[in-house]
Amino acid sequence: MNKEIIVSGIRPTGNLHLGNYLGAVTNFLKMQHEHNCFFFIADYHSLTTHPNPADLHANVRQVLVEYLACGLDPEVCTLYIQSDLPQIPELYMMLNMHAYKGELERVASFKEKVRTQPDNVNAGLLTYPVLMAADIIIHKATKVPVGKDQEQHLEMARTFGNRFNRIYNNSIFPEPYAFNYGKELVKIPGLLGGGKMSKSDGDGNVINLIDSPETIRKKMSKAVTDAGPTEPNTQPSPAVQNLFDLIKIVSTEDKLNHYQNLYATCSIRYGDLKKDLAEDMIIYLQPIREKIATISSDAALLKRVVELGREKASASAQKTLDECREAIGFKSF
């Protein structure tokens, strides 16, 4: 099978939640066995927000631990920390020489940052798409798992790669395109009655993989419902349907049928449902919480994983960078 080269960045911002795990991460676990995958922790990208040094390191470490606990295999894929590769900022600099102010200012995410944080419009924000392009094309990626909000950045990665090829009369960089999950991308509902589980609505909307049983019980007790059905066999509100959908994931089919029947007969007690769902959620997440605790306490393992990732990713990145330097005319005397 002809394996695609896939690159995907992992932002070191907070803990993974159930929606992340059953959504994108589950697909990463499949992809690592089917393609040549490079997964990196994007600590350079976080510098646009000026993080505290201790927080930055702790976040990078926690992300590494949780992805390993979820099942990413550093022997199968290449899992590395972005700042471990000096080749990335060098390629970033090269690409910046042919990235123009006007096109960067038209990027939707940049315009949004200018609107929402006018006191921190730094050069890193302006050239963020260039750094993202360097991350992708340093490994000559052909596919990138991205959401709709990142498609413009991926288009710019193609633009910068093609521009470099054209200016220096070579074909170093292939065109990267979005990886299509198709119908396999699972959307996990949140707890606050809206759409998918996402931290954009606050920590109360998500169940983190490391949440303690007490925290899970507290969050589930505050999950949004409604006043209850007033007529038999009515359609559940979106908030109640979210809870039924969570039961489908972590509980038995018998339990789902039980609560659906109670709802249909107007005899449901949401407090009982939420308590029951909380206990099933705790049991469902217990194995991964235990893995996170075990891996987090193994400093030697984490060091080996980081070193292996650095070695594998550096070899790929250096090969590309050597081609770029040769094309530009940087030669040894």
Image (cartoon, grey):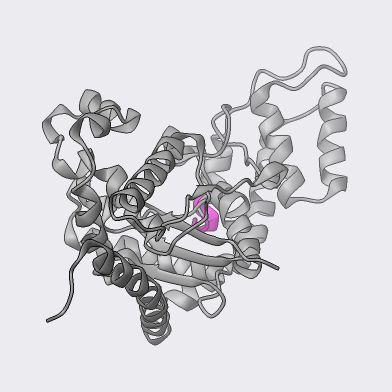
Nearer to us in this view, 219 or 18: 18
Residue 47 located left or right of residue 173 = left
- Quarter of the rendering containing residue 122: top left
* Residue 213 pos. (x, y %): 55, 56
Nearer to us in this view, 125 or 232: 125
The answer to whether residue 140 is visible is yes
Q: Residue at x 73, y 43 (%)?
A: 247
Residue 222 sits inside the magenta stretch: no
Nearer to us in this view, 196 or 113: 113
The answer to whether residue 272 is visible is no
* Residue 136 pos. (x, y %): 40, 56
Q: Residue at x 72, y 42 (%)?
A: 183
Q: Residue at x 36, y 68 (%)?
A: 320
Residue 66 located left or right of residue 131 = right
- Quarter of the rendering containing residue 203: top left
Quarter of the image with the C terminus in it: bottom left
Quarter of the image with the N terminus in it: bottom right
The magenta segment is 209-215
* Residue 223 pos. (x, y %): 57, 34
* Residue 267 pos. (x, y %): 82, 25
- Quarter of the rendering containing residue 55: bottom left
Reply above or below: 309 against 66: below
Q: Residue furthest front?
A: 169
Residue 277 located left or right of residue 314 = right
Total marks placed: 0
Residue 214 sits inside the magenta stretch: yes
Residue 161 located left or right of residue 23 = left
Reply above or below: 269 against 62: above
Q: Residue furthest top?
A: 231
